[in-house]
Amino acid sequence: MDSTDALALFDPQGPLASAIDGFLPRAAQVDMSAAVIRAMNDKVPLVVEAGTGTGKTFAYLAPALAAGKKVVVSTGSRNLQEQLYHRDLPTLIKALNYAHPVALLKGRSNYLCIERLGRLSDAVPSLSSAALADLQTVRRFAPLTTSGDVGDIPGLSERSDILGLITSTNDNCAGRDCAHYQDCYLVKARNKAMEAQVVVVNHHLFFADMAVRDTGFGQLIPDAEVCILDEAHQLPDIAGQYFGKSQSSRQFGDLAKDMRLAQKTEAKDMAQLSKAADQLERCAQDFRLAFGLDTGRGQLRQALARAPVAQALARLNESLGFTHEVLKLALGRGEQLDQCFERLIGLRTELDALIRVEENGHSFWYDCSRLHITLHKTPLSVAERFSAELARENTSWIFTSATLAVGDSFEHFCHDLGLSECRTLQLDSPFDYPRQSRLCVPRYLPETSGAGRGHMLAQTLLDTLEKVPGGTFFLCTSYQVMREVAEVLRARLDRTVLMQGEDNKVRLLEQFSQDGRAVLVATGSFWEGIDVRGKALQCVVIDKLPFAAPDDPLLSARLEDCRRRGEDGFARVQLPRAIITLKQGVGRLIRDVNDKGALVIADARLVNRGYGADFIASLPAMPRTRSLPALNEFLMNLE
């Protein structure tokens, strides 16, 4: 293919226009398609920032399908993955008369495990009444499914306690030794993907595949002639998770549960198995409690220096040693017990690697949830490892997102991924921001770090929110501010006020869109990947510039690494990441040529700090004001 083929694909009389009602070619879309064709031909990696409304999905998919290449498309989340596979791909397949097989592949935690479901008893003592009800729902679903995708189970919550018991992990999967291997839904999905010409995955699975290939024991997704990574701004952080190591206290609890199940079926006479399992589970819980009752992140090196943590870790290691001796005695009694022994060895090896915190080039940190603690060893840079992947012969690489550049520079993204040689393209959004939008940075705002800021901010913006004809996203940078804002708005605003966490994301968005005048108060997970068009969303409020918390362990390790190399950590790490995050939040507002709305960034640093100009330069060309009354007038005229 050459660049003229791009023009033919998107021509007003071309195949897309013939098959898609209302299709209109866009200059930026044609330019991106031509660049994708060039990258497929000369194998030079392509990095494209395609502004909202460019139509980037068709711009990369249409030429890839037309070329008949073996393609892997990876995107940022399962929701986007399903949207691409179930909506965009079928449209192009029809338009181009594409006859090759395509496949959707998710991670193993998305597929029902026949073996584990079959072994699960209603009498498991740890199951709550809600989990038992969910189990019955799963059992009714199991005979009817062909894919085994747990996301298709009607009425099953994404956070159901039963999910960990009916799906497998790398630790507890028996692989080819499983009696249900031939019928395994995960195996079938992977086999289908291996045979497909186009495979749609997500970034977590993409990097999990790279990690598996590093071990030399196979692969999860097929080799491809073209790798397209959409929502590519997420790649450096996700890659770090897979090129590093992590271990959760939940894994010890899961092993203990499986030991008890195995004893009941394979070694009823070995009471010490249950004793070892109880002790291991208790020591894992004590290890979590040694870090305190608060949730959040911290530096592991500092935590291990505290006596309660060091003592709890010593007891956990002693318990692992005892469990090792007990399982060793049970070897040969049954397949499940043998598998538990192998898992234990792996867990001990991982734990040993994670507590050797003096190793250079990594950040050692922990993350506490209410019930569990996860230890992490994350590389400070993935550039070297990823650049080795880029050297793969006969593979074309396309990286794209609506937010990759800082101003007009891609240096930050390319440096993080080791893209020393690549071609870049920046395509502006086709939307008419001067006509469709306004940006307000209000005067007389409360301090960005003051106590009770959420309450004061909500009170300051009450009149403005009341003037919005449609709905509003109130995006916050912390849970504390989110709760304070929601509290004030629910007391003072005569509208439906929804808050992240009170229902699952999909239902919250459905309720928000159907209401038409609601306010949704949310944090990080609603800053990107959300597409609400029309009057349902006419205002986005961002509480402050989204700089990562300075005590974030991964950030502080990267800043220290910059300091040692004589670089400015703020300019090199903090500022570019905050700009990309802000661009994502701003991108929620205008999603269509007919959308109109207002953006409020409640942070005076945007106009009174030198780096504010860097943020402004990276945002769409919205007319700006500092006057809330002027903004209110714009909002009242939206009708």
Image: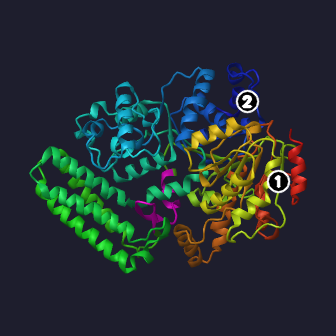
Q: Secondary structure at mark 2?
A: helix
Side (left or right) of 440 relative to 377: right
Specify the quadrant that holds the N terminus.
Answer: top right
Specify whether residue 544 is in view. no
Residue type at mark 1 is Asp
Amino acid type at mark 2:
Leu
Instruction: Determine the secondary structure under disc 1.
Output: helix
- Give the x, y percent position of residue 370: 44, 60
Give the residue at the far left of this rendering.
Answer: 269
Q: Which mark is residue 146?
A: none
Nearest to the observer: residue 458 or residue 588: 458
- First in sequence: mark 2 vs mark 1: 2
Residue 576 locus on image (x, y percent): 67, 62
Would you place residue 311 above or below residue 420 in this image? below
Q: Is residue 52 magenta?
A: no
Pointer 1: what residue? 463
Asked which quadrant contains residue 140, the reply is: top left
* Residue displayed at 74% across by 62% down: 457
Q: Is residue 109 above or below residue 486?
A: above
Q: Nearer the viewer, mark 2 or mark 1?
A: 1
Residue behind mark 2: 7
Name the residue located 28 percent from the left edge and 58 percent from the top edge: 346
The range drawn in magenta is 365-389
On screen, residue 636 versus residue 347, left or right, reads right
